[in-house]
Amino acid sequence: MISENEPRAISLGYEVDRYKLLAFILSAALAGLAGSLKTLVMGFATLSDVHWSMSGEVILMSLLGGVGTLFGPVLGAGIVIALQNLLADKVGSWVTVIIGAIFVVCVMTFRKGVVGELQAFIDRRFRNR
């Protein structure tokens, strides 16, 4: 409700700043938990885990799959990792450029991400029947 119409939420008496702070704290806690669990499982932490490109990769995964869905970022992560693994042997260092081009195409054509567009397509199919 807050993200859709913040002034309306304020006028209804919700403490918007408190909810925004809570969302920020929860997301930071989950990110810290994920990082610490990865370090525990792998047994080490590398500097590539804290490089700016890693956060860009996470955003790419989320946008590619679909931000407003639960399954979207998971599918986006699978697509990005699969592309990196498939293209690494064939094109070498051009993987980043190719994935960036795929990202631009997907953002321009799939506004809601892959899962969001698939849901919209299924909704249109069943609405026409």
Image (spheres, grey):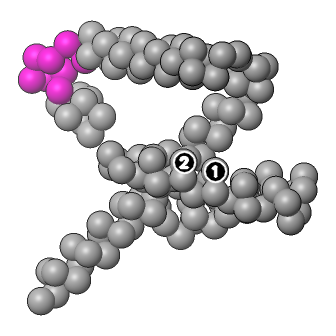
Residue holding disc 1: 81
Q: Nearer the viewer, residue 108 or 87?
A: 87
- Residue 24 placement, left or right of 3: right
Residue furthest bottom in the image: 129
How far apart are labels 2 and 1 at the CA level? 6 Å
Residue in view at x 22 percent, y 83 percent: 125
Residue 65 in view (yes/no): yes
**Hey, which quadrant is residue 2 in on the image?**
top left
Q: Specify the amino acid type for callout 2.
A: Ala
Residue 41, compared with residue 107, is above or below; it is above
Residue holding disc 2: 77
Residue in view at x 77 percent, y 26 percent: 48
Give the quarter of the figure containing the N terminus. Answer: top left
Residue in view at x 31 percent, y 75 percent: 121
Binning the other alpha carbons within 10 Å of mark 2 as few (below 14), some (14 to 19) or many (20 upward) gives many
Residue 24 in view (yes/no): no
In contact (CB < 8 Å): disc 2 and disc 1:
yes
Q: Position of residue 75 (x, y in %)?
A: 46, 54
Q: Secondary structure at mark 1?
A: helix
Q: Position of residue 63 (x, y in %)?
A: 51, 50
Q: Specify the amino acid type for callout 1.
A: Ile
Q: Secondary structure at mark 2?
A: helix
Asked whether residue 46 is drawn in magenta, I would say no
Part of the protein shown in magenta: 9-16
**Hey, which quadrant is residue 5 in on the image?**
top left
Residue 63, compared with residue 87, is above or below; it is above
Give the quarter of the figure containing the C terminus. Answer: bottom left
Asked whether residue 15 is drawn in magenta, I would say yes
